[in-house]
Image (spheres, rainbow, N blue to C red):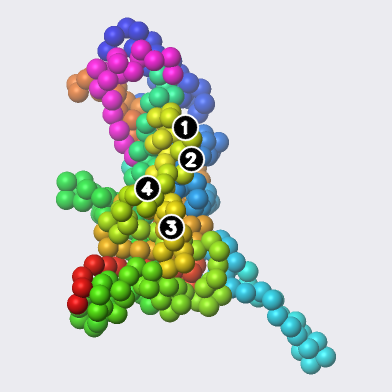
Amino acid sequence: MRNETRNKFNSYRESVALANGLSVADTDKKFTVEPTLQQTLENKVQESSAFLQMINIVPVAEQQGERLGLGAASTLASTTDTTTKDRETQAIANIDSIKYHCQQINYDSHLTYGQLDQWAKFPDFAARIAAVKQQRIALDRILIGMNGTSRAATSNRASNPLLQDVGIGWLEKIRTEAAKRNMKEVESGSGKIYIGKGQHYQNLDALVFSAVTDILEPWFHEDPELVAIMGRDLLADKYFSLINNNSDKATEQLANDLIISQKRVGGLPAVRVPSVPAGTILITRLDNLSIYYQESAMRRSIVENAKRDRVEDYLSSNDAFVVENYDCVALLENIEFKDK
């Protein structure tokens, strides 16, 4: 790298070392990111994604435990004849015994000397590097949440380009832990939910309305925060408008990964989120989806690899993807448009 780039890179490493109470020489060894810096990074990742800003990203002390059950689990109002019995409280949070397990996910990256030389021309050199990584971490978390089905000891990006083997996401959690909330077919053995003339559901509105009534618990049927999350295949782009589209700044445009339809589907706002599998609708509250990360478990190492003419940034976090309340979920899959 050029001398100007070297000076900026050294300053960047010095700032990382100072913030974590390290010597500059120790930044190329694996170190634990200071909790306040971990929180700052998590906040920046969340801020880079409109979708992540609307779900929960929660620090947890333990790597494993019972999910937090964020949000009211059921109704609370009641009456009691206290002349014959005591009043009894109702659990405000979900109290089932479903566990979470934060497992290591690596967010490793590198920049070549040539790329660093180009970026060194900008006064916000360090901030620019950080922003690109934060945005990619945000998109990767959404990918895993929507497509993750397993956690391989060593993931294979070529075989699983949607990060299916990096972690178990929200949709897979619903399939395995709340199968009765997962609708995959209408006619037994068909493996399809057909939408069209002569079919059981003639349009998406009928399907979504029926799913809310038949799959969600009654106290969530009229919840004003319910949305229908879907991919771009089910609704044409012309029915959507970007939120927060009052700025032309590239960094702010990148945050517009959440697109909300001006029209409703089955009475619910239609929300288009990147990476939702084709033919899939997830009905829930956005704040029913969570990402847990383990506090004081983020590890980092910044290594200059002269043999490859690049700088490598190794960053790992223990993460878990959690659905807080399965009573407020309906996962509809294998949707196809086909007249009978």
From where the camera sits, is residue 249 visible? yes
User: Depth-wise, is mark 3 or mark 4 nearer the camera?
Assistant: 3
Circle on res. 247: 1
Which three-letter amino acid code belongs to the residue tagged 1? Ser
Q: Earlier in the sequence, mark 1 or mark 4?
A: 4
**Percent coordinates x, y for residue 80 in the rendering:** 75, 85
CA gap between label 1 and label 3 equals 23 Å
CA gap between label 2 and label 3 equals 17 Å
* Residue for point 48% across, 35% down: 246
Q: Residues within 10 Å of mark 4 (few under 14, many from 20)?
A: many
Q: Quadrant of residue 333?
A: bottom left
Which three-letter amino acid code belongs to the residue tagged 3? Lys
Which three-letter amino acid code belongs to the residue tagged 2? Asn
Element assignment for label 2: loop
Circle on res. 244: 2
Residues drawn in magenta: 107-124
The residue labelled by disc 3 is 263
Circle on res. 141: 4
Element assignment for label 4: helix
